[in-house]
Image (spheres, rainbow, N blue to C red):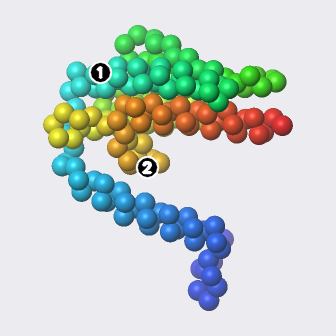
Amino acid sequence: MVGPMDTQRMLPEFIQKRKDLKITSQVSSARKWQQYPNPGSITQSQSLGFWRHLNDELRFTLSATQEIDIKGSISPFGEDISRITLSDHSLPPIATRTDIVLDGERIRCSVLNGGIYYLDLVIFHGTEIFAQDIQADDTPMNAQKTAEYVISRMVNIIEWMRRSSS
């Protein structure tokens, strides 16, 4: 068991940086949320509207991944499930996928080689819908930013797998 920290010593630099980042993030987050009124309930129609817009943005973002030598595709399974697949052209090829599911007022993202995370849907100003990953950062994201967030996490997995295989 680790005892109390010696207060005479300085924190390791990497811990101090993370501590400072956490404090800055908390202050920034508090300021961000002050500009919005309290979130309200989302109707099924609003959730589906955001979902459809998100899927369009995912298609666009996936088409852009070819610029970094990654191939992407999206396959819908019904009205509320989509599978996103990314692969690169390395030898051997590396791939990952994320199944995204609209689940009421949140989106469940099940990532191959990356676990599960949730994006909560929130509404502001009566009509604007945003998604938030409250486990990572509660910054509200529109459909475009949400698509970028999902694909970015997948690209990080591909890059990690590339480094691990070399």
Q: Residue furthest top?
A: 78
Q: Amino acid at mark 2?
A: Asp
Residue 95 visible? The answer is: no
Secondary element at tag 2: strand
Marks 2 and 1, how far apart at CA: 23 Å
Which residue is depicted at the point 77% across and 40% down? 163
Q: Which residue is tagged 1? A: 48
Q: Position of residue 90 (x, y in %)?
A: 77, 25
Q: Position of residue 118 (x, y in %)?
A: 43, 36
Which residue is depicted at the point 35% across and 57% down? 29
Residue 164 visible? The answer is: yes
Secondary element at tag 1: helix
Q: Residue furthest left?
A: 126
Q: Amino acid at mark 1?
A: Leu
| Quarter residue 39 falls in | top left
158 or 63, nearer to the observer: 63
Q: Residue furthest bottom?
A: 8
The C terminus, quarter of image:
top right
Q: Which residue is tagged 2? A: 137
* Residues at marks 2 and 1 touching, judged by CB atoms closer than 8 Å: no
Looking at the rendered structure, the number of numbered marks drawn on it comes to 2
- The circle on residue 2 is none
Is residue 147 toward the left or the right of residue 41 in the image?
right
The N terminus, quarter of image:
bottom right
